[in-house]
Amino acid sequence: VYVGVSSAQGLMAMSRNAVLLFLPLYVQHELGYGIFALGFYIALLHVMGIIAQPILGILSDRFGRKEVLIPSYVMLGSLYLLLSRAAPGWQLIVVVLAIGVFFYTLTNVTTAAVLDVAGDGIQASSLGMTSLFTQALSLPAPVLAGWLADHYGYGSTFLLSAGFMFLGAAVLIPLRLYKGTH
């Protein structure tokens, strides 16, 4: 179970690394926005996370980790699919805000799942190993995304990110995780 949760977190980190690298390039080069607009879009990722982090945390404590993680992974993957298809302006703002609900928040819920399955007295070691695994797994994502962007455009990097999220959801499906207090 630990390896599965760590793998799902690593896949999520792969998608996040690609999006963090190529969303700014997409906004500036593909859409032609300036630096101020770029800062605005990156800030949108954080705005919704501020609101969503405690909410998703409470939901995962109450209803269970899988009940929050799997739909959230699928939703985030679906939003990545929409990212390059959203029209500049309000559509893109709404998509980026929706991505912000899950973008950083899911790391907290996945970390809680790691702590749930870690044995007594090895929680910090388990988090350290998960961090190591996540960093190692996510390391090639920007390179792969860069190759795709060179050959197929920026939109392909968001497709790659969506694929990582869908694969992460599939990894979580068979795992036995904390079921919540409901």
Image (tube, helix red, strand yellow):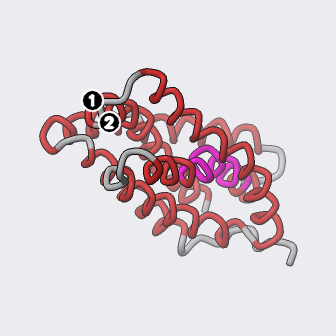
Residue placed furthest toward the bottom: 182
Q: Amino acid at mark 2?
A: Tyr
Which residue occupies 51% across, 64% down?
75
Asked if residue 101 lies in the magenta stretch, the reply is: yes
Which residue occupies 69% across, 54% down?
109
Task: Work out which quarter of the rendered image holds the C terminus and state it.
Answer: bottom right
Residue placed furthest toward the right: 181
Residues shaded magenta: 99-112
User: 147 or 50, which lies in front?
Assistant: 50
Image position of 95 with respect to 69: above or below: above
Q: Secondary structure at mark 2?
A: helix
Pointer 1 local density, CA inside 10 Å: few below 14, some 14–19, many at least 20: few
Image position of 132 with respect to 160: above or below: above
Q: Secondary structure at mark 1?
A: helix
Residue 50 falls in image quadrant: top right
**Where in the figure is residue 140, as x and y percent of width and height?**
33, 36
**Where in the figure is residue 70, as x and y percent of width and height?**
57, 68
The reply to whether residue 21 is visible in this rendering is yes
**Where in the figure is residue 120, as x and y percent of width and height?**
83, 51
Q: From mark 1 to mark 2, how far is it between C-alphas?
A: 5 Å
Relative to 12, 49 lies left or right = right
Q: Main secondary structure of the magenta part?
A: helix
**Where in the figure is residue 135, as x and y percent of width and height?**
49, 35
Relative to 92, 9 lies left or right = right
Q: Which residue is mark 1?
A: 29
Q: Which mark is residue 26?
A: 2
Residue placed furthest toward the front: 89
Asked if residue 146 lies in the magenta stretch, the reply is: no
